Image (cartoon, grey):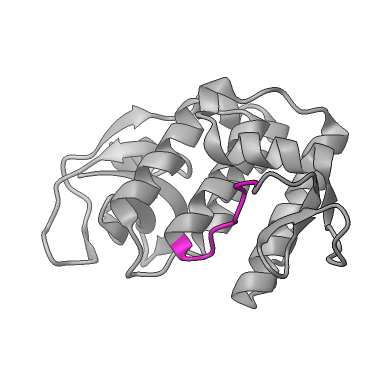
């Protein structure tokens, strides 16, 4: 089994609980003795590690066995700004329910980390929406687009009464972010990035009725 460590916490005297997102959903692993300096699991059970381990089918909590690190994403961990941006991926993962399409979601979050950029973080957020059941209608109908409306989840057009929450320039970047592979995403300046990030959070909050504490 393969998974991404998105959280860990101390457990009993020397153990840790390691919370992992996998192609089968969330699993909690008990890393025995991992709080000891001499433990082989000490490094494996770290936040933001891509790991493999022995699976116990039909269980969502069990002991971590035969664990190996595939990627520790050290370049992200050593850069505070990148680490903060990467943590947004796990904020968005909190919207995923037990019944969602974990295999597909796992692939897009793993790919976002492997091809990491601040643009891939936003792209994951927009790509995730269709798997959560809150897709955006981004297909134009031939009229002149003036922007995007969060309430109806759709493009809006000139000479219509509907307001646009973002203008046509940001809507163009939204379309690219939603449909382009991570490696083809254009770089965004900080202003555009922050505007699109706010729009993304606003969209999630409106359609899920869940407040995001960190923005």
The magenta segment: 132-140
Q: Is residue 39 visible?
A: no
Q: Residue 76 falls in which quadrant of the image?
A: top right
Tell me the quadrant of the picture where the C terminus can be found: bottom right
Residue 149: say if magenta: no
Q: Is residue 174 above or below residue 213?
A: above
Q: Is residue 129 left or right of residue 44?
A: right
User: Foreground: 140 or 174?
Assistant: 140
Q: Residue 32 falls in which quadrant of the image?
A: bottom left
Q: Position of residue 62 (x, y in %)?
A: 20, 62
Q: Residue 98 falls in which quadrant of the image?
A: bottom left
Q: Position of residue 53 (x, y in %)?
A: 20, 43
Magenta region's main secondary structure? Answer: loop
Q: Is residue 156 above or below residue 82?
A: below
Q: Is residue 22 visible?
A: yes
Task: Determine the residue positioned at 53% across, 28% down.
Answer: 182
Tell me the quadrant of the picture where the N terminus can be found: top left
Q: Position of residue 99 (x, y in %)?
A: 32, 70
Question: Residue lying furthest bottom in this view?
Answer: 209
User: Foreground: 215 or 6?
Assistant: 215
Q: Position of residue 109 (x, y in %)?
A: 45, 42
Q: Is residue 161 above or below residue 80?
A: below
User: Foreground: 162 or 26?
Assistant: 162
Residue 135: say if magenta: yes
Task: Determine the residue positioned at 17% across, 47% down.
Answer: 65
Task: Determine the residue positioned at 88% across, 57% down.
Answer: 159
Q: Is residue 5 left or right of residue 164?
A: left
Q: Is residue 98 above or below residue 78?
A: below
Task: Determine the residue positioned at 58% across, 49% down.
Answer: 125
All told, the count of numbered labels is 0
């Amino acid at each position: 089994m393969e998974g991404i460590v998105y959280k860990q916490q101390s457990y009993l005297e020397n153990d840790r609980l390691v919370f992992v997102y996998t192609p089968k959903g969330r699993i909690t692993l008990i890393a025995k003795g991992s709080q000891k300096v001499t433990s082989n699991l000490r490094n494996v059970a770290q936040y933001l590690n891509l790991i493999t381990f022995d699976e116990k089918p039909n269980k969502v909590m069990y002991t971590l066995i035969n664990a190996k690190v595939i990627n520790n994403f050290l370049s992200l961990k050593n850069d505070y700004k990148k680490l903060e941006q990467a943590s947004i991926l796990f904020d968005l993962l909190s919207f995923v329910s037990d019944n969602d399409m974990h295999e597909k979601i796992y692939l897009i979050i793993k790919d976002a980390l492997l091809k990491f950029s601040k643009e891939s973080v936003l792209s994951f957020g927009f790509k995730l929406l269709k798997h959560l059941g809150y897709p955006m209608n981004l297909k134009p109908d031939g009229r002149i687009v003036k922007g995007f409306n969060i309430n109806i989840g759709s493009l809006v057009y000139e000479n219509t009464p509907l307001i646009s929450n973002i203008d046509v320039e940001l809507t163009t970047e939204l379309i690219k972010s939603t449909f382009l592979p991570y490696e083809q995403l254009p770089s965004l300046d900080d202003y555009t990035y922050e505007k699109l990030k706010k729009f993304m959070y606003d969209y999630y909050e409106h359609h899920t009725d869940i407040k995001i504490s960190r923005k």
